[in-house]
């Protein structure tokens, strides 16, 4: 009977060792599941004068073989919003990038005061996803949080004001041509935007994340996760 405590201690050690092995196994499965996941990157932000450049990124690259990346020599479209928070219109003059031989700009270049310029390969979707609502600090220049509103006391918007705000939204496409090196998710490049009045600003631009989750390879979760 005196040996019973020793047996109990030995049993506790065995159980503890088994639990440690289970935890280690689960941890290994988690590493296997996540080591192939590409980073989800939000766009960059920059301010130059009264212009705010938001969600600046390269569009998620196409699939090349078994991976998504931009090969050297290919083209890459930019996605961003240029919000004019000032009281005067401005204009995008040129765009350059350290990893491209040329950059083309098509569509509207003017950034209307109190509005914004939506840039992307599918400008309609970019505008819908990131459009500032009329009456917000983004949508109207010079009326930020904490400033008194000039709207009527009833709170009713001025007739036709929302329509005018929508009409003033610009759309453009900016494409980096002839990439000088391979660009993959998780990497950044430097893109310089030059405006007529606000001047130039250089933005460290990441590669955007996919708009939809990537499909998981068949059987990967079951094999890697082991049910944990």
Image: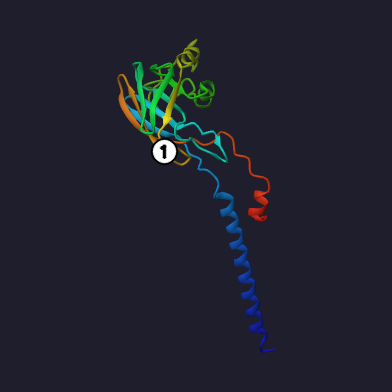
Q: Residues within 10 Å of mark 1 (few under 14, many from 20)?
A: some
Q: Residue at x 66, y 56 (%)?
A: 226
Asked if residue 204 is positioned above or below residue 23 in the image, the reply reads: above
Q: Residue at x 67, y 85 (%)?
A: 4
User: x, y percentage for residue 17?
Assistant: 61, 71
Q: Quadrant of the N terminus?
A: bottom right
Q: Is residue 72 left or right of residue 49?
A: right
Residue beneath disc 1: 188
Residue 116 is situated, as x and y percent measured from the top left of the image, at: 43, 21
Give the residue drawn at x 58%, y 53%: 32
Q: Residue furthest top?
A: 159
Q: Is residue 177 left or right of residue 11?
A: left
Q: Which picture quadrant has residue 57?
A: top left
Which residue, as the protein is rendered here, is positioned at the far front? 73
Q: Give left or right: position of 171 versus 8.
A: left
Farthest bottom residue in view: 2
* Position of the C terminus by quadrant: bottom right
**Above or below, comparing residue 226 to residue 77 in the picture:** below
Task: Mark yes or no: residue 146 visible.
Answer: no
The image shows residue 88, relative to residue 46, as above or below, that is above
Q: Is residue 7 left or right of residue 118?
A: right
Rendered image quadrant of residue 24: bottom right
The spot of residue 141 in percent (x, y) is 38, 21
Q: Which residue is nearer to you in this view: 8 or 222?
A: 222
Q: Nearer the viewer, residue 5 or 35?
A: 35
């Amino acid at each position: 009977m005196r040996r019973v405590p020793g047996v109990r201690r030995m049993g506790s050690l065995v159980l503890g060792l088994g639990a440690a092995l289970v935890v280690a196994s689960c941890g290994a499965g988690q590493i296997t599941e996540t080591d192939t996941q590409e980073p989800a990157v939000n766009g960059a932000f920059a301010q130059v004068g009264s212009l705010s450049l938001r969600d600046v990124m390269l569009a998620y690259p196409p699939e090349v073989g078994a991976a998504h990346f931009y090969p050297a020599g290919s083209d890459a479209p930019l996605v961003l919003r240029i919000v004019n928070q000032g009281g005067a219109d401005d204009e995008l003059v040129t765009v350059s990038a350290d990893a491209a031989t040329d950059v083309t700009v098509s569509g509207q270049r003017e950034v209307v005061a109190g509005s914004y310029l939506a840039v992307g390969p599918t400008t309609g979707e970019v505008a819908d996803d990131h459009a500032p609502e009329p009456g917000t600090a983004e949508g109207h220049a010079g009326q930020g949080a904490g400033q008194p509103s000039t709207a009527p006391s009833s709170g009713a918007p001025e007739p036709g004001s929302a329509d005018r705000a929508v009409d003033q939204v610009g759309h453009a496409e900016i494409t980096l041509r002839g990439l000088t090196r391979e660009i993959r998710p998780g990497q950044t490049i430097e893109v310089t935007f030059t405006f007529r009045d606000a001047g130039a600003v250089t933005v460290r631009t990441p590669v955007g994340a996919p708009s939809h989750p990537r499909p998981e390879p068949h059987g990967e979760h079951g094999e890697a996760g082991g049910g944990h």
